[in-house]
Image (cartoon, rainbow, N blue to C red):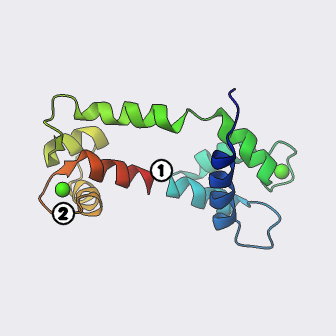
Amino acid sequence: MGEVSEEQKNEWKRIFDEHDTDEKEGLSRDEVKQVMCCCNQNPTDKEVDEMMTAMDKNSDEKVSFEEFCTFMQQLPDPAESMKEALEVFEGQDGKLTREKLKEILSTDDDDVVEEVLNAADINNDGFIDKEEFIKFIQN
Ligand SMILES: [Ca+2]
Ligand SMILES: [Ca+2]
């Protein structure tokens, strides 16, 4: 586990505070779910439960900022994940087509593909380029 930079901690604090909407005593199960949704995940109840168990070390049904940090430290390096994510652009001419997007999302649901494309395709040229993709992931 590497050192956590001040910047990284501030970022986690920001995420934490943003979702800790109740009395600031930590993240409840619902709030943890919100965090997961923000990470572009669509968690099932079971996944939220697992996440909760993984984060809530002292089992008080709340995730404190310390618990949150401990958990985040175990996650893969964002820069590393970003590099991996960008590998989808290999051989794609720097642009993702609708078909490629479908493949990445591994879905047959055109509505889902359309939704992602609409959300990510900032200049509306029908493709997602690297910059748009990075922005999309980071949001
Ligand atoms: Ca706790
Ligand atoms: Ca575009």
> In the image, what residue occupies the spot 79% across and 68% down?
24
As displayed, is residue 112 above or below residue 77? Answer: below
As displayed, is residue 66 above or below residue 76? Answer: below
Give the label on residue 41, or none. 1
Residue 57 placement, left or right of 46: right
Residue to which mark 2 is pinned = 123
* Crowd around label 1: few <14 · some 14–19 · many ≥20 (10 Å): few
Q: Does the numbered disc 1 mark a residue whose Cβ is under 8 Å from ligand 1?
A: no
Residue 85 placement, left or right of 42: left
Q: Nearer the viewer, mark 1 or mark 2?
A: 2
Q: Secondary structure at mark 2?
A: loop
> In the image, what residue occupies the spot 78% across and 46% down?
67
For badge 2, the amino acid type reads Asn
For badge 1, the amino acid type reads Gln
Q: Please tell me in which quarter of the rendered image ligand 2 is found.
A: bottom left
As displayed, is residue 110 above or below residue 101? Answer: below
